[in-house]
Amino acid sequence: MKKGQKLAALLLAFLVAAPLAACGGGQATGNGGGTLTVLAAASLKASFTELAKTFETQHPGTTVTLSFAGSADLAGQINQGAPADVFASADTRNMEKLQEAGLVDGEPQVFATNTLAIAVPPGNTAGIRSFADLSKPGIRLVQCAKQVPCGAAAAAIEQKTGTDLAPVSEENSVTDVLGKVISGEADAGLVYITDVRSAAGQVEGVPFPEAASAVNSYPAAVLSNSRNSADARAFLNLLTSPEGQQVLAAAGFGSGRN
Amino acid sequence: MNRQAYSGVPRWIYALAVLAALVVVLPLFAMVARVNWASFLPLVTSESALSALGLSLRTSVASTVLCIVLGVPLALVLARGRFPLQGLLRSLVLLPLVLPPVVGGIALLYTFGRQGLLGRTLEFLGLQIAFSTTAVVLAQTFVALPFLVVSLEGALRTGGERYEAVAATLGASPGRVFRRVTLPLVLPGLASGAVLSFARSLGEFGATLTFAGSLQGVTRTLPLEIYLQRETDPDAAVALSLVLVAVAVAVVALAYRRPSGGALQTSTQRTTTAAAPGGNVA
């Protein structure tokens, strides 16, 4: 038994080490080499890609590595020990999870907000004008599942307005919702204003005032196992600086400092 | 005698073989180790879990039936027919085996979707495929059909045409030969092909997510439910994964059991024939 365990551990170590060694050449050493690894929510892709370039210009010698995914996925990766310096989440819940696990260094800063909007295919064939229109019979509505941030926001608005939505599909991510509107399968989708902005030309946006009652906050924080916390802090400062806020506002994000 | 004494496997091969087995077994073991047994039963018997499991089983049975109804004629034509571009047809039919499921989902979307190739016609007929359970069955059939065709075509080829030729010379009509000679001969191959199709349908994820959507009781099968639960409740995701692994183990055991050597024979046939057309595809 013991011998078997030892062998298993040895083989496991080999399994883990071999691929790491194989791609070690491309990996940053992390300490002092001036690499900043930022894990950010998928909706931040366009703005963070731009801000990373700004940061690299401001800090010559520092390379910013970006990784985008769903906030819950990223929080899970950090929990499993993924090496990273900054985490930017699309909701406070996933950030709180990491805080509880003691993986966050200092207080997270809310640097942006995002609001839901209705996306419809070009031409708005179903004639959606308001949030209430979404519950009209025969409308094929696609939204996020309640387990993900965009779905939680939709559910909150539904409850507050007393509307009863009957979506034909509850997707795992807001990009999946957007995809089903772009492909014309759905008459309407509940996405973020930033998604409508980034898919301009492929979808039309229908803003609705009720969305203001469920605004998502985007917090960012330095991670406690960061090997480059000085640069990480500087990156957070860039996010809340006028320059950073301008880039985020251009993508449709609301200001983080209300 | 000599054959028994000689084992032609070098020792170092064993080391690599153990490693290969570990690649498969270790992750499964790691997952089982993560199961929260205290809450296991409530997690797998929750309303959403049971609804997903029920939907998965129902749709997988439906697509397996569809695979048999459509796959048997196709395998027969590929094995026995002689017509131009036969090799090309075989390669095309086997494509879903090597395609990423998401690609399958996109292809199905542009076929049966609202804006798709058949979408207008279907809508005119009052049929809406996307976001319906029918879409799930279609996605599963798309990915599972090659498994049945490969198994059965292999069995048909290895079985040969001698008995059929004899039956025909004795005056049996083609239909009678098919029912009384061909089908009984390849029944084990058909059975294992059907079991594999069922297993593939049960595990279908990418094409369903892309093409059918995700709604409890309608399109959210067990793999989709696992993917969703993982967002908020990893314990539930692990518990449901274990249920799926248990079903898969049962299915594999069923497909590879060898009561009288019959199933073993067809499984070796499958391996040899699966390799050949696979090479064609690549």
Image: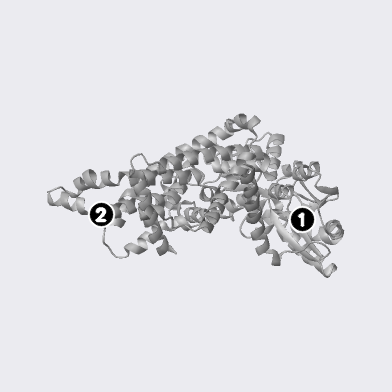
Residue at horizontal 57 percent and vertical 40 percent from the top = B241
Of A76 and A150, the residue lying toward us? A76
Picture coordinates of residue B68, whole percent (x, y) = 35, 45
Q: Quadrant of the C terminus of chain B?
A: bottom left
Classify B154 as above or below A166. below
Picture coordinates of residue A236, whole percent (x, y) = 84, 56
Please give left or right for residue B243 compared with residue A253 in the image: left
Question: In this rendering, does residue A139 appear at all?
Answer: no
Picture coordinates of residue B218, whole percent (x, y) = 52, 38
Q: Residues within 10 Å of mark 2 (few under 14, many from 20)?
A: some
Secondary structure, mark 2, is loop
Residue underneath mark 2: B160
Residue at horizontal 73 percent and vertical 60 percent from the top = A66
Q: Contact (CB < 8 A) between labels 1 and 2? A: no
Tell me which amino acid carries mark 1.
Answer: Ala
Tell me which amino acid carries mark 2.
Answer: Gly
Please give left or right for residue A253 compared with residue B282 in the image: right
Residue at horizontal 75 percent and vertical 50 percent from the top = A89
Picture coordinates of residue A96, whole percent (x, y) = 79, 42
Please give left or right for residue A135 compared with residue B175 in the image: right
Question: In this rendering, does residue A81 appear at all?
Answer: yes
Of A97 and A101, the residue lying toward us? A101
**Chain for mark 1?**
A
**Label at residue A84:** 1
